[in-house]
Image: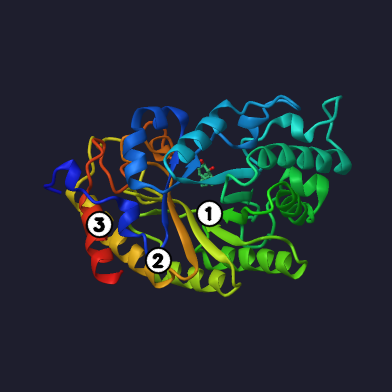
Amino acid sequence: MNQNRSEIPALHDMFRDAFKIGAAVSTPIISAQGPFIAKHYNSITAENEMKPALVQPQEGEYTFESADRIFEFAEAHGIGVRGHTLLWHNQTGDWMFQNAEGGPATREQLLARLQTHINTVAGRYRGRAYAWDVVNEAIEDKSDQYLRDTKWLQIIGEDYLRQAFEMAHQADPDALLFYNDYNETDPVKSQKIYKLVRSLLDQNTPIHGIGMQGHWNIYGPSIDEIRSALELYASLGLKIHITELDLSVFNHDDKRTDLKAPTAEMLKLQEERYAEIFAALLEYKQAIDCVTFWGVADDYTWLDGFPVRGRKNWPFLFDEQKQPKASFGRLAALTATQL
Ligand code: HXH
């Protein structure tokens, strides 16, 4: 866009009549890019710094410095915080699942640790996170299995899910509590997510929303698939947050590593996709109350290391110099006419 920085509208302001616009951050990124983040985003999520292994690396040994700084930054700028995440099968210390001898913990032991973890973490920030991803990625990808075969499932059994939400609600009664997952537009997986959340609701579990991660790319999923998933989840009467949006410029099976910059064709496709995806999200603005990008701008994305290590990716609305891309202009035009 051929504009001065001062004339560039704030991204979150473009969407003020629809939903909050968030970004995943880290403490170094907040230090380096605080004013840029505060200008464009009104919600933030810690990419890593509130995950179980980072806040409780060893039993009873809590490291809250980074998480505290993220809350302080947010509060100094009137930005909301989405907590991520209280229970996951990844980035959780091995100690969580082990007894003193290194064998498997018992159900009672693991439930007690879960209770302590959630009480300590969600309780520390009680009233300060407007939402928490309580459980991340508990559904199996293989179509013939329902729940992911994790230590949580093996040791506690299916009710670990309900228990986690009950504990989170007790620790922070005002926070909106989310179930968060990826491949959430897949027709088979989305039915399993629906089934899980339906069963939690049937047991009067305090769950308030579904987090659709949105790790998509410039080729898919199709808008029809995205719309069907939104329709299905909205039919539960819960809120939907898009929690980790990024549009990779590479297809799943593209393993190229030679590009130094996105091609013109990639940027064109990305622009079209951002426009059509946000048009669909605006149709569901009644159900959606936050759309979070899994990063701030193209200078850093977790996709630089996944699924191909060391391969640069350019998934966002702002380029490596923090300048708005053509995609940003399309969203400015879309919101000017639709909102
Ligand atoms: C998210 N997982 C997490 O929620 C977030 O906390 C993290 O910072 C980044 C992304 C997405 C994800 C899920 C499964 C996965 C990879 C990424 O596992 C795969 C491994 C190989 C191939 C496909 C998926």
Give the labeled residue for mark 2.
281
The residue located at (82%, 43%) in the rendering is 111
Q: Does mark 1's beta carbon lie closer than 8 Å to ligand 1? A: yes
Front residue of 146/88: it is: 88
- Residue 255 occupies quadrant: top left
| 194 displayed left or right of 79 | right
Q: Quadrant of the C terminus?
A: bottom left
Q: CA distance from mark 2 to mark 1?
A: 17 Å
Crowding around mark 1 (Cα neighbors within 10 Å: few <14, some 14 to 19, many 20+) is many
Give the labeled residue for mark 3.
271
Q: Is residue 140 above or below residue 263?
A: below
- The amino acid sitting under disc 2 is Leu
Q: CA distance from mark 3 to mark 2?
A: 15 Å
Counting residues from the start of the chain, the first of labels 1 and 3 encountered is 1
User: Which secondary structure, mark 2?
Assistant: helix
Label pair 2/1, CB-CB below 8 angstroms:
no
Instruction: Give x and y (percent) for residue 177.
Output: 63, 55
The residue located at (56%, 54%) in the rendering is 181
Give the labeled residue for mark 1.
182
Query: Closer to the observer: label 3 or label 2?
Result: 2
